[in-house]
Structure formats: structure tokens, C-alpha cells
Image: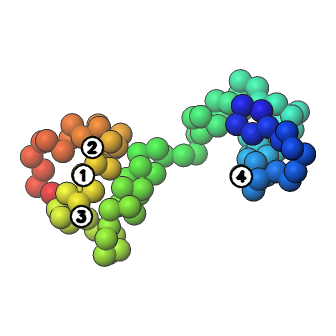
Amino acid sequence: ADMFANEEGGPEPDWVITEREQFSDFRDLNKDGKMDKEEIQHWILPQDYDHALAEARHLVYESDADKDEKLTKEEVLDNWNMFVGSQATNYGEDLTRNHDEL
């Protein structure tokens, strides 16, 4: 109800339907209608998810203008704000170090 209150009695927006499906299919593992401590832990820190790899793929996908799966210095500089705000670069700290690959 904090994000969506169906006060008019109309149909739910698509995003609400999607969130309900996500909860039912992936979050509520024991199907009791609520999330317990273990389900929340699995959601926030899944064991089968590599956060560093996901962030690196995200940076390449968003910054690789020519879609050759390689980043040039220009592509990184054109998207500096994404890299500075990324955990993968320690929020920009690693970009100030001298790197041969850049």
C-alpha cells in the first residue's frame, strides 16, 4: 500500500502484477505468503549470484558503444559517471591508479 493503493477499484498496473509474480515465483520459497529471514537472506545475498561479474557485465554493456565487447579509453571516458558510481571501480577510486589495460 506504500507504493500502490488501489483506491479506485480499477485494474492493477502491470508493474504490480509483475511484482506479485516475482514474489510468488522467486521470493516466497516456502509459499506461506510472506518472507521469513532465510528468504530475505536468499533474496539480498543469493549464493548463486556473482555481484562483481554482474556489475562488470553491466558496465561493459552500458558503455560499449560499438558493441565489440571491449572498452576503449574513449568509451570509458564517455561514460565516466557510470564508472565513478560503480562498486566495480571502488566508486571511482581504482580509476585514479595507473593501469596498463586502460
> Could you give the CA–CA distance between mark 3 and mark 4, rounded to whole angstroms?
33 Å
Q: Amino acid at mark 2?
A: Val
Q: Earlier in the sequence, mark 2 or mark 4?
A: 4
Q: Identify the disc placed on residue 75.
A: 3
- Element class at badge 4: helix
> Could you give the CA–CA distance between mark 1 and mark 4, rounded to whole angstroms?
31 Å
The answer to whether residue 26 shows anywhere in this view is: yes
> Could you give the CA–CA distance between mark 2 and mark 4, rounded to whole angstroms?
30 Å
- Is 101 placed left or right of 92 in the picture? left
Q: Amino acid at mark 3?
A: Glu
Work out whether 42 lies above or below 101.
above
Q: Quadrant of the C terminus?
A: bottom left
The answer to whether residue 53 shows anywhere in this view is: no
| Residue positioned 90% across, 45% down in the render | 9
- Element class at badge 1: helix
Q: Nearer the viewer, mark 3 or mark 4?
A: 4
Q: x, y percentage for residue 98? A: 9, 46
Q: Quadrant of residue 64?
A: bottom left
Q: Identify the disc placed on residue 59.
A: none
- Is 50 placed left or right of 80 in the picture? right
Q: Are there few (<14), some (14-19), or many (20+) residues within 10 Å of tag 4? A: few
| Residue positioned 71% across, 24% down in the render | 37
Read off the residue under disc 2.
Answer: 84
Q: Amino acid at mark 1?
A: Trp
